[in-house]
Amino acid sequence: MSGLKKQFQGVDPMRAKFALTAVLAMMASAQGAFAQGCALCYTSASAVGKAGERSLDVGILTLLTPALVLFLSVMFLLYRRAVAATA
């Protein structure tokens, strides 16, 4: 048996695939983080007044809320399923 197989002996294959997929997804999405320094976005955001800043904040929260709720719901369901499988 090779050293790699010995190291991962007893690891659930589905869990390993999920971990690999999660790592690949994080690596693929990291490139989008560099867009936060976009000159056009910065210029547009800095040109608005206090009311515009408030609108941008509300817009960000509006877009963030459904994604966060969906993510947390899936994580909760996965956690419940993992706990039920071990019990």
Image (cartoon, helix red, strand yellow):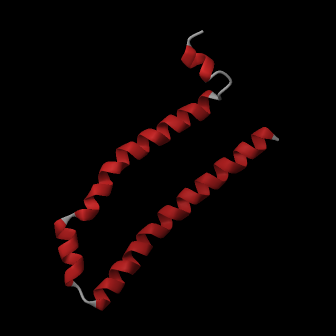
- Residue at the right extreme of this rendering: 87
The residue that appears at 43% across and 74% down in the rendered structure is 62
What percent of the width, then of the height, locates residue 84?
A: 77, 44
The residue that appears at 49% across and 42% down in the rendered structure is 22
What percent of the width, then of the height, locates residue 31?
A: 30, 49
The quadrant holding residue 81 is top right
The residue that appears at 20% across and 76% down in the rendered structure is 44
- Residue at the bottom extreme of this rendering: 50
Locate the C terminus and report the quarter of the image it occupies: top right
The quadrant holding residue 37 is bottom left
* Whether residue 44 is situated above or below residue 52 in the rendered picture: above
What percent of the width, then of the height, locates residue 76?
A: 65, 55
* Whether residue 34 is situated above or below residue 81 in the rendered picture: below
The residue that appears at 61% across and 22% down in the rendered structure is 7
- Residue at the top extreme of this rendering: 1
Q: Is residue 74 left or right of residue 22?
A: right
Locate the N terminus and report the quarter of the image it occupies: top right
Q: Is residue 77 left or right of residue 25?
A: right
* Whether residue 81 is situated above or below residue 8 in the rendered picture: below
Q: Is residue 16 left or right of residue 39?
A: right
* Whether residue 13 is situated above or below residue 18 in the rendered picture: above
Of 85 and 7, the residue lying toward us: 7
Total of numbered circles in the picture? 0
